Image (cartoon, rainbow, N blue to C red):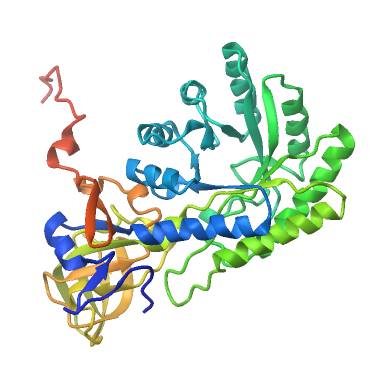
Amino acid sequence: MRLTGTSHIGSQGHLTIGGCDTVELAKTFGTPLYVYDEALIRENSRRFVKSFEQSGFAFQVAYASKAFSCIAMAQLAAEENLSLDVVSSGELYTALQAGFPAERIHFHGNNKSEEELRMALEAGVGCYVVDNFYEMALLHDLASASGIQVNVMLRLTPGIEVHTHEYISTGQEDSKFGFGVADGQAMLAIRQALAKTHFNLLGIHVHIGSQIFDTTGFVEAIKVIREFLDSVRQETGYEVKVLNLGGGFGIRYTDEDDPVEIETFVETITQEVAAAWAKRNLPNPEIWIEPGRGIVGNAGTTLYSVGSIKQIPGIRTYVAVDGGMTDNIRPALYQAKYEALLANKASMVATETVSIAGKCCESGDMLIWDIDLPQVTSGDILAVLSTGAYGYSMASNYNRLRRPAVVFVRDGIADLVVERETYEDLVRHDRKRSVLSNIV
């Protein structure tokens, strides 16, 4: 098992992260608990930025806040001079509450409401990634009424199929996102955007999927888009200033995963863009990307307390923990796989094979099937690794479970950045019936 960032096995045989003993973290903050290695988040961010700096391209690295959004994370992104990708008014509000510079916010989403667009316009959001004709007309009407010009990009679907789960593949022709290149919608969108007086068309956006382990799909997307842009230039004279290649960069969850290194990814796409643009004697565009999982995924660890243990002779041993699909729905939704260890027995050798069950009333609430661990007993602390992306952000109150707390750890200090929900929080918006029925 490979530990990442500042994680290591301490002198007591416990898993430590950021200089903090995870067993002590569990005692102090309770479980389930999301623990983020702040130094690793910063390291991942800086690797993206440094790689682009070395490429010579103008660029923006925009953290995709859908992976994990809270005020502290937006503050950290601002400190690392990242831009920020938001997809809802809630993510936008969080960023603004964190003091994130609005001009570095990119507003995404396939169904932005009038309320959301008004909120973004009032805040001075820096760029809108327009997803469809309905949004294009609505945004322009609102910008016109406000007397302002807005920066826009058009999201295109290049028809690229990538090897990932179908639920997180987005670049194929049959997608809920964007304007299709092959069906002519992209060209029509370009023409309409150029004709709108309150739009400044910066360029185009392409996102082909998530948890992608090689650069082939990105290279193919660049080729498709460059050929499309040739047609655009011939028909309209327009040439993009910005090429946004989205995110989707995979991370390692288990030994089965073999992701491309950040530096290799950036080098590959910048060289491909440089060659394609040089072939046409055109100046390089500015390149934007949107890593989310690639920045926070392997920096997160979820701690659980072991409860009941059920042995089915000759079949399986179920080890139940105090969380599950409410704090990590990815195994149930995507059949995602994870590695884990007993945080309080991290230096001990594995002696049994067990399966980790969540506590929700669903047979599908299984976090890990068939994992080798030391002898497990009730009260042990299970640490599931690489849960930094889409755990907290997709958490729910199913079965009226309370969402966990979040701590950032660094240099031996644990900073509580999201409090654990209380029982009062669960019913805060409930209302008792105002009229009682006499029906029996």
Report whether 435 appears left or right of 208: left
Q: Determine the residue positioned at 67% across, 20% down.
A: 198
Q: Determine the residue positioned at 42% across, 64% down.
A: 335
The percent position of residue 377, horizontal first and vertical second, equals: 13, 76
Taking the image as drawn, is residue 331 in sight? no
Quadrant containing the N terminus is bottom left
Task: From this view, report whether residue 192 is shown above or below residue 218.
Answer: above
Taking the image as drawn, is residue 352 in sight? yes
The percent position of residue 326, horizontal first and vertical second, equals: 28, 52
Residue reaching furthest right? 234
Report whether 209 appears left or right of 405: right
The percent position of residue 294, horizontal first and vertical second, equals: 48, 58
Q: Quadrant of residue 338?
A: bottom left
Q: Determine the residue positioned at 42% across, 73% down.
A: 254
Residue placed most toward the observer, 315 or 68: 68
Residue placed most toward the observer, 247 or 16: 16
Q: Quadrant of residue 23?
A: bottom left
Task: From this view, report whether residue 311 is shown above or below residue 5.
Answer: below
Q: Quadrant of residue 2?
A: bottom left
The percent position of residue 72, horizontal first and vertical second, equals: 33, 44
Report whether 209 appears left or right of 318: right
Q: Determine the residue positioned at 24% across, 85% down.
A: 352
